[in-house]
Amino acid sequence: MWGNSARAQDRVSVALEAPETVSVLLRQHVRLLKSAELTVPEVGPDQTALVRRTRREVVDLLSTEGYFNPEVRLDRRSGDKWTLTVEPGVRAAITAVDIGFEGELASASEAEAAALRDSLRENWALSVGKPFRQSEWDSAKQQLLDAVSRRRYAAARTLSTRAEVNEAGTEVALSVVIDSGPTFRLGELAVSGLSRLPADLVTRYSTVEAGDIYDQDALLALQEALQGAPQFASVVVDIERDPALAAAVPVRVQVAEAQSRRLSFGAGVSSNTGYRVEAAYRDVNILSRGWELSSGIRLEQLRQSLFADLFFPPAPDGHRDSIGALIDNSDLEGLKTESQAIGIGRTTIRGDIETQIALRLQHESLHPDGADPSSLTTLTANWTWVQRAVDNVLDPRRGHVLEVQIGGGSSIALAEQDFVRLYGRYQHYFPIGEADMLTLRGELGATLAPSRDGIPQDFLFRAGGSQSVRGYAYQSLGVTEGDATVGGRYLGTLSGEYVHWFRRDWGVAAFVDAGDAADSRSEFRLRTGYGLGARWRSPAGPLAIDLAWGHDDARLRLHFGVAVAF
């Protein structure tokens, strides 16, 4: 094992005497210390070779941590007891750093190149005064190369590196030279992997243009945009880093098409609308044009809906158009509503901001208990602006969501009267400690019109329920008409919730909600609710169960919601 000597061998144990700063490292990597008992040759060439090999192993290992002049001894103390003594000495420190450049980055005199050179030197990770470690030296070199090659200089390479240790082993001088190569400009898209989808679909999602300076972040953004499109199962976007192609390097886009059609079923329950079953059908390549059809039917105890939406691929400026139809029937708080609508919309997403403008023609029939029925046909327009500045869109813990809506209708376009609806919602997430979270939410809404007559319920306001003011029934806060609750022209809600996660997927919540919906500001008054709840990050999605006391109703209500797809 340690040699092929025919001499008798002893079974021995080896103890380590070394400072704590290096003992863990030595025990993990020195072969002689990995086993409590080892076979060591008797005195002779094999034993001498073992001692030399161990010493060399320790010296090489400590040099990676900046100890270049250690003292290493392997002695036989008594019988089968051996001791490996290591005195690492002084750890070497960085005393000089020289970062040089060749290629276009070195010769370019414009301000941008000079600023980049200064920034690269300033942000060098292993500065003067720091202790030398091989792993940090390797990491710093790679970070420097990545920073150069991230934008413009796609073919950048490390030309030379040197770590020079002084004779005493206490000082290290570092030098690195990076050859940037030429500036790369993007050429045309070179798309592969398409068979069923239209050839221009990738181009319509593209956010880069021929002639753009190479930017790795821009290519990653294109890859993420394509990966988010339902037509693609996987996407890889890259270029060939050949300096000969720098003037117009093709952007290679390799895609794998996703399954076009999908039929799914689900079931769920919530305290707002009761039990439900649903079915959905999706086809992401209608007429082989890359159009996306999303349709479904949902049957709930208090609400039933049938919908179909057709989404078109993005336009060159980034917006996406859609058309849709909806049939919706509900029976909530004594108000039976039958609604049919068709509409068109345009959605634009830039970073964390999404905007949408929609035009909708709808017919609505209202049957309030204890009051006369009514119906109306209205053409409405609505503009929505949403910013989702959160750390995780599906399970946020830090950041905020801000939403603003402006919509309305006019008497010159089917509406019974002119009206304008204004709505705003703000929700902020505050991380507390390691896992806890505080959430604050507020809503304000106002429909500007002489009265609520002839205004669709979607453009009025009701409150109450699990996503509004807990402690009150879903949409029970509003205007009384007969024995029913209908929408009013004003809305205001506030909410504060603290969640303590005592396990990764389990938590408890305490909350206070307040709000109301009314038909005039004089009738508006805050209704408060407060209580405790449980939180579970289930495989089917987040589950919230809240027990809330409605102060004005003087009763407890259970609020919950869960949905399961199958």
Image (cartoon, grey):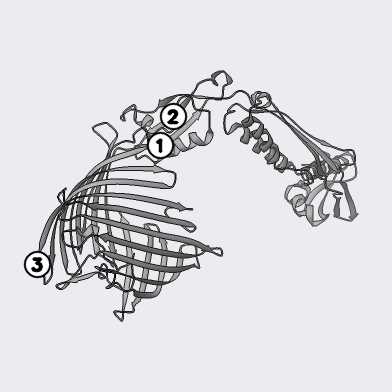
* 461 to the left or right of 78: left
Mark 2 / mark 1, whichever is N-terminal: 1
| Residue hosting label 1 | 226
Q: Say which of 392 and 254 sits in front.
A: 392
Q: Are marks 2 and 1 in contact (CB under 8 Å)?
A: yes
**Residue at the left extreme, as displayed:** 372
Please state which of the two labelled residues, at mark 1 or mark 3, is closer to the viewer: 3
Mark 3 or mark 2, whichever is nearer to me: 3
Q: Is residue 395 visible?
A: no
Q: Residues within 10 Å of mark 2 (few under 14, many from 20)?
A: many
Q: Position of residue 501 (x, y in %)?
A: 49, 66
Q: Amino acid at mark 1?
A: Leu
| Residue 183 visible in the snapshot | yes
Of callouts 1 and 3, the N-terminal one: 1
Q: On the image, numbered disc 2 is attached to which residue?
A: 253
Q: Which residue has dot 3 on it?
A: 372
